[in-house]
Image (cartoon, rainbow, N blue to C red):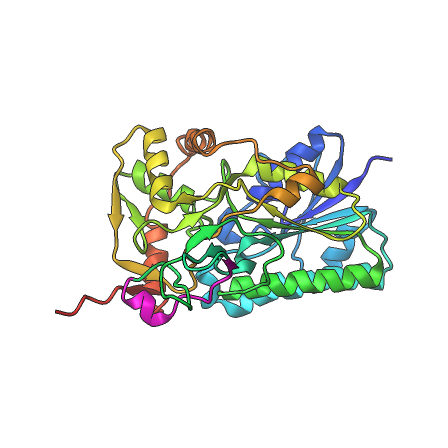
Amino acid sequence: MTTLVLITGGAGFIGTHTARLLVARGWRVRVLDNLCPQVHGPAAEPPDDLPAEVEFIRGDVTDRNAVRAALDGASAVLHLAALTGVTQSMHELESYANTNVTGTACIWDVIAGDRIRLDQFVLASTRAVYGEGAYQCPCQNLILHPHPRSPDQLRRGQWDPLCTACGSPMTPVPTSEDIPPSALSVYALTKVFQEQLCRQMADLTGTPLVTLRYFNVYGPNQALRNPYTGIAPVFCTQLMQGHPASLFEDGLATRDFIHVRDVATANWLALNYRGTRPGVFNIGSGCPTTIEDLARVIGLALGVPHRVEHTGRYRVGDIRSCYADTARAAKELGFKAGIGLNAGVCDLVAWVSGQALPRGAFESATADLAERGLIRVVAPIDG
């Protein structure tokens, strides 16, 4: 009998790409999604790019009846449903805790209570659980996981984490799965708890578990109306509408951008994973890219002059650098990103060029965050 996989949040950006891949590879797919208005719009229907073969259930992961119906007959779960905005989470604590923590607990409540036997449970987690990534100090040959940058350091525009021994800026290096969690936002806290909850319940119920820590996912079908969805579609929208790409800090913060089709492949590999212990894997490209370089690549793909605006502001909860050590995912999961940034951005730009672009969503969200004290201005230099 063909495997039936339940994808929670499967009508979203990553879910639709994964559903298409699984259907193409002969899997039966069921989606549970509440069609959140922030992502799908106020009068949303299941997206057109969700394959016709997919069984769709409109419901929330916090609704036990909806979860029970969605799990009926499933032999695998890919748990994607989550709220994901780092800065937004700092003022919508209840919503983030409810969806990310209570929703996950509800799923496991049904699995345990109904004695559902699953071949695999795959949790979509995030690089945000690391806080700042790994760094190397210039005065000692050690890999360090620095403390968060202090409010005073940020206020003065001193962006790089400093070595506590010599006071010098440190150099980012690849972040491995073995670094202990260091959540710097409410979103990250909910994901750390989600990981721990899944690990405990998987042990209790004997359910095989894989945890995937996605880095910065981008690509076609990313929600343009959602200002918290990721920086790549924001830059596309700003540049296509004749505005400069807005940069926080000095624009040199680094991230690890990975194309959504690569992430869909990682999800498929995780559903097939049969390791002898629960697997935790970084899903990234392993290549650090500065935010300003991303804006440059997008500008080149759009054929418009590269224009950026250094805003002189910074966001509470942001990190300076984190990019993936991909060795474990390559060795144990068989995953390696195949789509480079230039090709991936061209793919994103080709899709965005055919969409109706929202106006003012990012600016409105930025103004709201600034009013709440979550976006701050660098202090002028004395003297």
Q: Is residue 23 left or right of residue 343?
A: right
In this view of the protein, which residue sits in the foreground, 29 or 150?
150
Q: Position of residue 47 (x, y in %)?
A: 57, 39
The structure residue drawn at horizontal position 35% and vertical position 40%, both measured from the top left corner, is: 293
Q: Position of residue 112 (x, y in %)?
A: 82, 62
Q: Is residue 57 left or right of residue 226?
A: right
Q: Is residue 324 left or right of residue 228?
A: right
Res. 309 in view: yes
In this view of the protein, which residue sits in the foreground, 343 or 146?
146
Residue 106: quadrant of the picture:
bottom right
For the C terminus, the quadrant is bottom left
The structure residue drawn at horizontal position 51% and vertical position 52%, both measured from the top left corner, is: 37
Is residue 9 highlighted in magenta?
Answer: no
Q: How many marks?
A: 0
Judged from this view, the residue extending furthest toward the left is 383
The structure residue drawn at horizontal position 58% and vertical position 63%, both measured from the top left corner, is: 181
The span picked out in magenta is: 142-157
In this view of the protein, which residue sits in the foreground, 324 or 62?
324
The structure residue drawn at horizontal position 32% and vertical position 71%, both measured from the top left corner, is: 152
Residue 14: quadrant of the picture:
top right
Q: Position of residue 20 (x, y in %)?
A: 65, 33
